[in-house]
Amino acid sequence: MNSFTRIHKRLVTAAVAVLALSACGGGGDDDASGTAGADGVITVKLGVVGPKSGPASLYYEYMDQTFETFSDDFEEKYDVRFDIVSEDDQAAPEETARAVSRLINEKGVHALMGPPLSGNSLQVADVVQKSQLPWLLPGPNADEIINYDVQPNWGFMTNFTNQQIMAILGERLWSDGQKVGIVYSADGFGQSNLEHLKSWAEENGHELTAEETIQPGASDANAIIKRFKDSGVDSVFMGITQGADTATVTRAMEQASYQPKTIMTTGTILTDYQDVAEPSQWENIQIVDPRNFLEGGDAWVLDQVREETGEEPAIPTNNISSYAILDIYAQAVKEVGDATDFEAVRQAMEDIETVHIGDLTIENPFTPEDHVLYDDDPANWLTYGFDKNFDLVLKGTAAECLEKGC
């Protein structure tokens, strides 16, 4: 199994992005009417917003890779073609607002995909809901993005939510009476991790021993680790957006000879962590995820990305989520027959019977009060560690690790 991080850093140039988007129709195609053309194919004008440029460009690249790899698949399976109209929000909330406004009001898109970062999605959630366009969310996992008090609801999420992962991680972090500390990013993703972990702890009779924040691009985390040690923290959760910032924390752990019994983080470690970390720094880290990265349909998605693009999946969790949301939306458009009948498409997405991810199927995932693909049953989540090459090693289900240890 290949490593989930790229062997070499790659600059995502505008030329590459144009080529990738051209593979799925490019932008501004006059045939993107949302109804079937002479060839029987429905061409959908899909607005895509994310950070094409800047330090968070991986969060656009995974969407780009998914379009490049699978655009023909959805046309063959569902007679749905995606005409991509993209906007670069540079991961800045004010740019996200402008980008979403342009896509909705000027470009006339039939559906919106992204933004991929939770904080940016929260910034535009009300605007998108009021636009009454299907909102495809393969990346964010902040529960607050989808407000179920708004009905009918237009957002559909194919990543797990922070609330779900905290339900899985909480039992593990506080097992055997451990003292728990969290270090989290100073952004929407990190703040949401903190809030949901604290909420779970309070509901289950626990408390956080220490909570520390790390600024994006911080050069060291020595003071954070010292405070963890002084507080007696022996179970650490890293709710950090960028793998490079996670590496800053684990490097400080090693420098301080700090060895907690439990170190858990999220799939964001798969982004750019390995390039700036050493095997000794990741040997005790584990992640949990509802996706099987090593076999079956989830692994097939990642293998296809490698084969078609010649690159490692930019963010493996979200490459899979992107495929899933496009499958859901394409099925709904095929059923309705008209992408401009937004309410009918939204209803078809909510009523979908089967999500297809390669040979993996997920049955009846949505209800009006639940637009999230996954659940929080620990029997449906997997626990992974890493070998010396940073390849994932399956430890067992989350339930098994709670019962027997991993």
Image (cartoon, grey):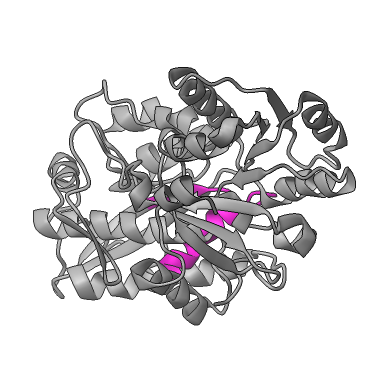
**In the image, what residue occupies the spot 81% across and 44% down?**
253
Which segment is the magenta one?
47-68
Q: The N terminus is located in which quarter?
A: bottom right
Q: Is residue 18 left or right of residue 295?
A: right
Considering depth in this image, is 153 or 285 the residue closer to the camera? 285
Considering depth in this image, is 133 or 297 the residue closer to the camera? 297
**In the image, what residue occupies the spot 20% across and 26% down?**
151
Q: Is residue 320 magenta?
A: no
Q: Position of residue 72 (x, y in %)?
A: 32, 75
Q: The C terminus is located in which quarter?
A: bottom right
Kindly indicate the quadrant of the structure image that contains residue 271: bottom right
Q: How many marks?
A: 0
Q: Is residue 49 magenta?
A: yes
Q: Is residue 63 visible?
A: no
Kindly indicate the quadrant of the structure image that contains residue 314: bottom right
Q: Position of residue 49 (x, y in %)?
A: 48, 47
Q: Is residue 243 left or right of residue 147?
A: right
Considering depth in this image, is 380 or 267 the residue closer to the camera? 380
Q: Is residue 49 visible?
A: yes
Q: Position of residue 334 (x, y in %)?
A: 14, 60
Q: Position of residue 205 (x, y in %)?
A: 48, 18
Q: Is residue 66 above or below residue 128?
A: below
**In the image, what residue occupies the spot 70% across and 36% down?**
234
Q: Is residue 219 left or right of residue 46?
A: right
**In the image, what residue occupies the spot 48% across and 21% down?**
199
